[in-house]
Image (cartoon, rainbow, N blue to C red):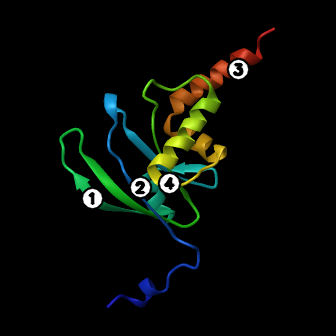
Amino acid sequence: MFPISLLNQNKLVMKKITFNDEMGTRERKCRFSVIHNSKSYSKEDAENNNLAVFKRIGYNSNGKWSSTTWEVSLNSATLVVCMRPFDGWSDKLSDCLEHIVSTNRDYTKEEINQETALQFFSSVYPNTYKKICEIAELENKLI
């Protein structure tokens, strides 16, 4: 029998998303983050802040190519899952954001907006984001 607290579910509509974090070719890692109120959270931080619950529902043991299948429960937060492009990131921010939106759709079957993609990109790939910002700043200084 479940405790009564488990039967009284939160009134928000809970979303469950399933994805696999398998590594891509050239050892490209699957990266994921939970976005809430314009802030990016790691798996652990999202769980500690009651934004998401990650359940490991499968595991494929294959050496360095091992992967986990996750079921993620969310209410008000958004899960973003991405793998860097095969040929590396573009120096054009709009290309990077479109890649994140598209890749997230492939992994999660969910749509995210450009703002969420930007929050993910700037926090999960900070060095690449900084480089793009520096290039944009140099362009703005041209006379």
Under tag 3, what secondary structure?
A: helix
Q: Identify residue for label 2.
A: 44
Q: Earlier in the sequence, mark 1 or mark 4?
A: 1
Q: Amino acid at mark 3?
A: Glu
Q: Amino acid at mark 2?
A: Glu
Under tag 4, what secondary structure?
A: loop
Q: Residues within 10 Å of mark 1 (few under 14, many from 20)?
A: few
Q: Identify residue for label 1.
A: 58
- The quadrant of the picture occupied by the C terminus is top right
The image quarter in which residue 136 lies: top right
Q: Identify residue for label 4.
A: 109
**Measured along the vertical axis of the image, is residue 30 above or below residue 129?**
below
Q: Identify residue for label 3.
A: 137
Q: Nearer the viewer, mark 4 or mark 3?
A: 4
Q: Residues within 10 Å of mark 4 (few under 14, many from 20)?
A: few
Q: Earlier in the sequence, mark 1 or mark 2?
A: 2
Q: Amino acid at mark 4?
A: Lys
Q: Residue at x 24, y 40 (%)?
A: 65
Q: Is residue 94 left or right of residue 61?
A: right
The image quarter in which residue 18 lies: bottom left
**Measured along the vertical axis of the image, is residue 98 above or below residue 41?**
above
